[in-house]
Structures are given as C-alpha cells and as structure tokens.
Image (cartoon, grey):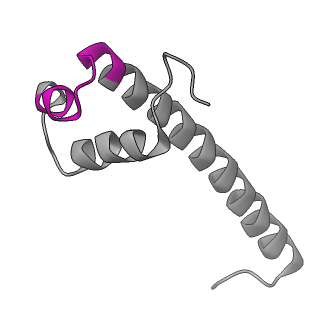
Amino acid sequence: MLGMNKLSIATRAQILSMLCEGAAMRSVSRLTDVSINTVSKLLEEAGRFCAGFHDVKHRCSGEERVRQSMSGHGDQ
C-alpha cells in the first residue's frame, strides 16, 4: 500500500512525461492535482537518477574504449 506522501508510478510517469513534452510545472501541478513542490521534487529526483545513470554508463564505455585502444582493437 502506498504511504500518504507517495505518488503512484503512473502519476510519476504522467508528470515526467508532461514535463518532457514541455508543459510548465504549474500546469502539470494543476492537471495532475499535486503540489508544485511535489512536481519540483520529482523532477530533481529524476535528474539525480539520470545523472547517476549517465555517469555509470559513460564511465563504463570510457573504460571499454581505453581497453580497446590499448589492445589495438579500437575504432580507427
């Protein structure tokens, strides 16, 4: 069961989708019936997740490129 302060996955997805489509935060807040602070916090949380995901993927692909170039099998 969801706690009082937890948004459903569907609501989170709807909010993030609307923001990605270019909707204003206040509009998203009104249309989804959540506080603008909730929209802001969700956006910050998603941004932190994406930054971490990017760092992990970028770091891994960078190590792979270094290994390939050191072994002589890199793209040339």
Query: In the rendering, at what x and y percent does residue 32 appear?
Result: 23, 34
Against 14, is 48 above or below?
above
Q: Is residue 36 magenta?
A: yes
The residue located at (15%, 45%) in the rendering is 22
Against 33, is 36 above or below?
above
Which secondary structure is most common in the magenta stretch? helix
Q: Is residue 61 left or right of residue 23?
A: right
The N terminus lies in quadrant? top right
- State which quadrant residue 27 falls in: top left
Query: In the rendering, at what x and y percent does residue 3 appear?
Result: 57, 20
Q: How many marks?
A: 0
Q: Is residue 72 magenta?
A: no
Q: Residue furthest front?
A: 1
- State which quadrant residue 44 falls in: top left
- State which quadrant residue 74 falls in: bottom right
Query: In the rendering, at what x and y percent does residue 37 appear?
Result: 31, 14
Q: Is residue 21 left or right of residue 34?
A: left
Start and end of the magenta stretch? 27-38
Q: Nearer the viewer, residue 52 or 13?
A: 13
Q: Nearer the viewer, residue 69 or 43?
A: 43
Q: Is residue 43 left or right of residue 32?
A: right
Q: Residue furthest right?
A: 71
The C terminus lies in quadrant? bottom right
The residue located at (27%, 23%) in the rendering is 34
Against 65, is 45 above or below?
above
The residue located at (84%, 68%) in the rendering is 67
